[in-house]
Image (cartoon, rainbow, N blue to C red):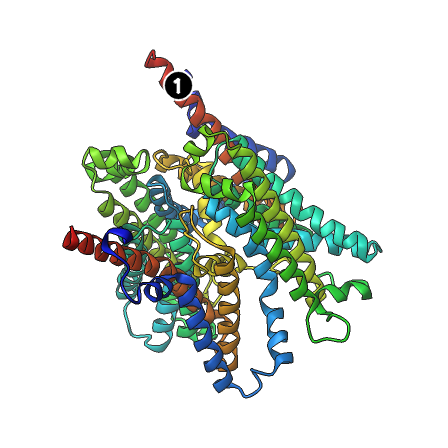
Amino acid sequence: VEASTGRRPGAGIRALAGRWESILVLIFVAVIVFNSLASPYFLNPANLLDTTFSFVEKALIALPMTLGIIMGDIDISVAGIIALASLVMGLLSGAGAGTGILVAAGLGTGLAAGLLNGLLATRFGIPMIAVTIGGISLFRGIAYAVLGDQAFTKYPQPFAFFGQGYLPGTHIPFELLVFAVCAVIFGLLLHRTTFGRRVYAIGNNPVAARLSGVPVQRMRLIVSCLTGLMSGLAGILLTSRIGSTRPNIASGWELEVITTIVLGGVAITGGRGHIVGVILGIFLLGFLKFGMGLINVPGNVQNIFAGVLLILAILIPGYVARAQERARLRRTRGSG
Amino acid sequence: MKRLLKRRESTLVIIILVLLAAVSLRARGFLELSNLNDILTDTAILVIVSIGQMMVIVTGGADLSVASGIALTGMSVAMLNWQVPGIPLAVLVVLALVIGFILGSLNGLLVSATKIPPIITTLATLGIFRGAVFLESSGQWVSAHKMTEAFRDFPHAAPLGISNLLVAAIIVAIASAVFIRFTRTGRNIYGAGGNRTAARYVGIPLARIDFLVYAISGVLVGLAGLLWVSRYASAQNDTATGFELQTIAACVIGGVSMLGGSGTIAGVVLGALFLGIVNNALPVIGLSPFFQMAIQGFVILAAIIANSVVDRRTQAALMRTRKL
């Protein structure tokens, strides 16, 4: 179509402006400007790095969930998995386990929970979102059953490093490094491997994918396990950061994680999305929430904001795409 | 007889009877009429909200915003009752239904007019409604002494011989059973949930049905909101948190398929009763109430698996009769 109508001046800019990621960058800049006006301390590099503590744990879960959502599987049990992983670590820590065992237990619990979700979804042909509705209750419920209104607060001293520590001699939080490494791994996995191509194939048309030899069920199982594993990792970092385990730990996180992903331009109906967009979405929402904190917006009210943002982030790109399609049709009709 | 035994409702009745018998072996008083009445009263709100949830699930969606909706309606009427005690109860009831309808309509509009998956839409409104409760109350509670006596007594008053809570649940159950079984619109709800492409071809007004089920769910949420805060004589910012999962549990236990297209009101009522009995039995058999959520999660997963196995068998049986 572009060839037949000829390249117009400024078409490149228009294409760039139409990209969701470009819009995100613009909003991102606006948020930074707003925040630095709201607080003179915001743009201080050390402070800026410290704000990342408030969202990198959610960001870690957003990475595998991006793969899941592109594939058409939405896992809403992730916050429950964090509670379960934190519970297991708390139990072991109470029994005198060392830091290494705690980390292994956190990852192992997450993996096991993801495996359970994945097996139920693939073996019984139940949508992932339905399975994980049960999963939310089960995982967090176990934490409630064991803890009741109690909390674990006894963790070994070295364990605190994961969620509170900085890289030696810098202001860079260890959590941020973990996220950076994971983001690169997931970016390469999604955009540079056969595995990644298959994720898109399944998301666009699972039947066609299966008929062309993509092991759809195995892929879904693997992504579910990855989601569990990363939730376990987020559980380790969060538990280490706040130094305690309560059964309501991380409650409501699923809403924010899904909002982040959708804000990053991933189609909630599957098939489309890019890790770079999701990373932009993570930082955008993180700084936005930080800015709201600066002007004293309470957490509950920030939820209104997350909800509205989630709906708008799904609706607006759809309307933009349709408007562009109409404009394109008019152009072709006009020239042909 | 064989067909009757195979139905989910019959299985549930048997399970419930066994459960009752087992618990009463541990605690003699469990089967007494007053305790059974307590269980029914405790379950009434769950029954009411689960019925709306069921209609939504039958169309292939799910309404995660019900608990936040209960909190928002409940806080609204409780604050009104506190600030303007002169408003008659009947007006508050109507108001609660209207607020619920508005909340449900918002979900309904979003689901029917956009391509956002219903669970995501209602996850968003879950956050929005919950945040709105906080905005409305500025974080304060409306506690018992701020409510009028008539307001607090409403759920337990029994002008008809049984408590208003039970009356409400029974009316909702019967009315919705008649609606979904015997009216064209009611049957269309099932049609909308099975195969949506086929539904469109046979002329089922999908957008209207989608809107309708969320609106109905909203109205029932409104009713439940008023009953909730008056029954517990307290409206808080975290009222009913997590209750949406209980309503979904009641549905899947009652045989409603999460894929949409099937489920009965009787099944949902029994599913809710099952959960109500389990919750009431926990302290009796010496387990802390904190076990409730885990048991519920386990039962949801078990029920989802059972439903999917049944679905597959039905499919296989259908395929056989077609003699392909």
Q: Name the side, left or right, on which B43 lies relative to B114.
A: right
**Residue type beneath disc 1:** Arg
Residue at image point 42% right, 38% down? B258
In the rendered image, the quadrant that contains the N terminus of chain B is: top left
Q: Is residue A146 visible?
A: yes
Residue at image point 35% right, 66% down? A13
Q: In which quarter of the view is residue B25 placed? A: top right
Tell which of B117 and B228 is nearer to you. B117
- Taking the view exactly as shown, the residue that stands out farthest to the bottom is A40
In the rendered image, the quadrant that contains the C terminus of chain B is: top left
- Taking the view exactly as shown, the residue that stands out farthest to the top is B323
- Figure check: A266 above or below B203: below
Q: At numbered mark 1, what does the secondary structure look like: helix, strand or loop?
A: helix
Q: Is residue A75 visible?
A: no
Q: Chain of mark 1?
A: B
Which x, y percent locates residue A98? 83, 56
- Figure check: A77 above or below A127: below
Which x, y percent locates residue B87? 28, 72
Q: In which quarter of the view is residue B24 placed? A: top right
Residue at image point 71% right, 69% down? A164
Are there few (<14), some (14-19), or many (20+) residues within 10 Å of tag 1? few
Tell which of A282 and B196 is nearer to you. A282
Which x, y percent locates residue B273? 46, 41
Which x, y percent locates residue B272? 45, 42
Q: Name the side, left or right, on which B186 lies relative to A111.
A: left
Q: Which residue is label 1 attached to?
A: B3
